Image: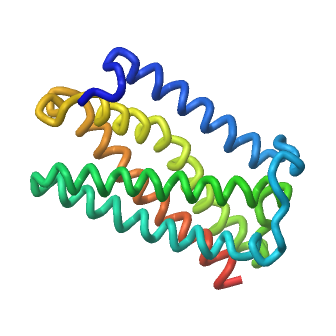
Amino acid sequence: MEYVSRERVTPLAAVLSVVSLAVVFAAAGGQIPQETVPAAPEWVLDLIPHLNVAISAAAIGTITIGWRAIRRGDVDRHRLAMLASFGLFATFLVFYLYRLIVTGGPQPFPGPDAVYQFVYLPILAIHIFLAVVCIPLVYYALLLGFAYPIDELRNTSHARFGRYAAALWLISFSLGIVVYVLLHVVY
């Protein structure tokens, strides 16, 4: 069953990517007023990073399951795992953006300056770069999956874009966990 018009996959992926990235960068840059979201108790805000690291770990698991499933030819399991991965990513993003908006920006690094400059910042930069690059790839692969029946999907670039999206997504989620460990465990 066709859910997305085939001719609209590329422009829809582009629009969704631009809107998503605009919201993320606006929230990270403090451009979304705190009054636009409901207030939360401090314990909720403190819980979000811990919840998000669990979501990230679960997403790594579902992406890996989806990747292995398609390599084994199990399309239904692949589809379910990748939709779960996207749902986890969306949930992660909602919590992350909510915390950014309410707290007024990213959490400062509490460790030593040398670790900040030579370890934390490079890892964070790569994590952010990969997350930004992943967004259009994930949208495109997902929309192709909705636009074509399974037997026709092999004739599209779904597999090629999906491989890149999954690999970069895995690395980005993994580096996000490293950022969490540096911010909340080590320092």
Instruction: Give the position of the N terminus as an image quadrant.
Output: top left
Outermost residue on the front side: it is 1
Question: Residue at coordinates 76% horizontally, 40% vertically from top-left?
Answer: 26
The picture quadrant where one finds residue 184 is bottom right
Q: Is residue 100 above or below residue 165?
A: below
State left or right for residue 124 relative to residue 33.
left
Pinpoint residue 5: horizontal percent, then vertical percent: 34, 19
Please state which of residues 60 and 9 is positioned toward the viewer in this rendering.
9
Instruction: Give the position of the C terminus as an image quadrant.
Output: bottom right
Outermost residue on the top side: it is 7
Please state which of residues 63 and 44 is positioned toward the viewer in this rendering.
44
Q: Is residue 22 above or below residue 130?
A: above
Pinpoint residue 12: horizontal percent, then vertical percent: 47, 24
State left or right for residue 112 relative to residue 136.
right
Pinpoint residue 97: horizontal percent, then vertical percent: 70, 53
Q: What number of labels is visible?
A: 0
Pinpoint residue 164: horizontal percent, then vertical percent: 34, 44
Q: Is residue 88 above or below residue 52?
A: above
The picture quadrant where one finds residue 33 is top right
Outermost residue on the bottom side: it is 186
Please state which of residues 130 and 47 is positioned toward the viewer in this rendering.
47
State left or right for residue 26 relative to residue 174.
right
The picture quadrant where one finds residue 112 is bottom right
Question: Residue at coordinates 43% horizontally, 69% vertically from top-left?
Answer: 58
Question: Residue at coordinates 42% horizontally, 63% vertically from top-left?
Answer: 59
How is the structure coloured here? rainbow
Question: Residue at coordinates 31% horizontally, 19% vertically from top-left?
Answer: 6
